[in-house]
Image (cartoon, helix red, strand yellow):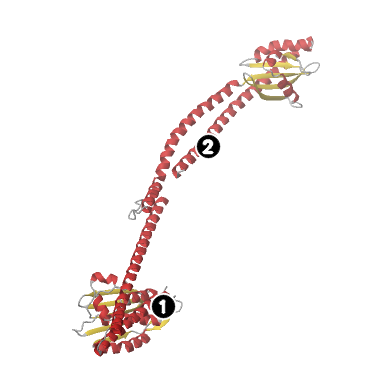
Amino acid sequence: MKFADKLFFTMLFLLTIVFTIFGVWMMQADFSRMLNREMEHGNHESRMFHFLFETGYRETEDFGEDLAVNMTMESVAKNVERNGSRCFVMKQDGAFYYGEDFVKSLDFEEEVRELASTLGDQVYAACVRRADDGYYMLGISVAETRDSCVYLGMCRELTPIYQDRQGLLDQYGIALICLLAAGGVGIYLLSRYITWPISNLNKLAGRIAEGEFDLRSHNKSGDEVGSLAGNFNRMADRLVAQMEEKTREARQKEDFTTAFAHELKTPLTSIIGYADMLNSVELSEQEKREAYYYIYSQGKRLESLSHKLLELAGMNRGTESFRPVSTKSLEGNIRTTMRPIWRKRGIRGKVDLDRGTILGDEELLLSLFYNLLDNAVKAMDKEKEGFILLKGTVLPEGYEIKAVDNGRGIPREEIGHITEAFYMVDKSRSRREGGAGIGMALCEKIARLHGADLEIDSNVGEGTVIKVRFPSPETFQA
């Protein structure tokens, strides 16, 4: 059952219960007031009948009890039996002096005798009894006669007020049906109005599940449904972003596998080809040395590639081994390592790191800076004097190290891809320089592991600036 239908039937049920209970209570309260009024009126008539009987009996008691009672009733009945009331007189033994036919016509003999037996020390008793043709109030009292005592009774018809009550119940039933019909229409429309945003959100979720990922809810209401729609949109955005990320990762893995296979194929082809040539063809000493050189150089390339891949795969280590690393210690190590390389390539290089501290793994940090400087060396043109600077600066929020070179530069459209494994801007030049396209992917992964931001800015023909911003040791979070 739909939520709107549940809401409709629940509200309709509650409306029915409330109006039924309220209506029955109101009519019952009104009926009780009417019945009490009739009972008080009947009680008044009974007292008047008792008074008139005793007065009339005293005037005729000299004629004997039976005659006195009959004579008294002849004078009293015409004054008492009005407005549908009837009276009767019963002896103690259950026989009737007066009104026996009336009592028997209503089949009230047993009720009258039972009511008389309940008097005891009471002077008056009354009850309501139902006969075939209606409802009656029976009231009975005791009057003393010369020889004993008699029971004086009044019977007052209450059928009209019961008929009025039944008529009101019938009318209220019709009114309740009409009210529920009108209220049901209103409740149905209201339930559909309340659940309409939820239904739309459900349809939207179904369409998104079918692949329409650009759809979003436009519900801007300030209630819980609006909040749900906002959370739904954020969830959809996050899911789409995660899907795009997974798609990108899958594509990168596929590209990685393709590039890796290609990178292996090229040196292996050279190694196999030259090895086969050495084995099957008579070569001069010069040709043999060239073949040996190609086999050696391609083997070293495979060795370098394997080292890079192992280092890249080992980046999943935790940060529990991170320690404060002095930038001056890094400066001395980097300068000592890079100075021979710069001298050999005729490059003016400088390492200047302000005194500070970086929380991390010293080996990984050295690998990061070595790769940045190695890429800068490979980017130099032989036609102009090369210059490379590794500069470290203490910032209020952490520590920044930037690698600056005046090499060939990187095209703007290529900058977003150079941290992908095996991606090379100029593949032929990179291979001649011994590169495999893994260095920047390694740098990006090391920086991310240290909570650092990697920012690349470059212009073709002017050079490249790569900034690495490390958080302060106090605020670092892995």
Q: Circle 2 sits on which residue?
A: 17
Is 20 positioned to the left or the right of 306 in the image?
right
Q: Which residue occupies the foreground of this view, 47 or 136?
A: 136
The vertical placement of 286 against 15, above or below, is below
Q: Residue at x 47, y 34 (%)?
A: 180
Q: Is residue 437 visible?
A: no
From the viewer's perspective, is 85 left or right of 449?
right
Q: With respect to residue 68, does 447 lie above or below?
A: below
- Residue 13 visible here: yes
Q: Secondary structure at mark 2?
A: helix
Measured from the top left, where is residue 330 in percent x and y? 36, 85
Counting from the top left corner in percent of width and height, residue 455 is at 30, 74
Q: Amino acid at mark 1?
A: Pro
Location of the C terminus by quadrant is bottom left
What residue sits right under mark 1 in the picture?
Answer: 473
Q: Quadrant of residue 125?
A: top right
Quadrant for residue 475, please give it: bottom left
Q: Element type at marker 1?
A: loop
Q: Residues within 10 Å of mark 1 (few under 14, many from 20)?
A: some
Q: Between residues 115 and 466, which one lies in front from this camera angle? A: 466
Q: Residue at x 29, y 90 (%)?
A: 340
For badge 2, the amino acid type reads Ile
Q: Are there few (<14), some (14-19), or many (20+) residues within 10 Å of tag 2? A: few
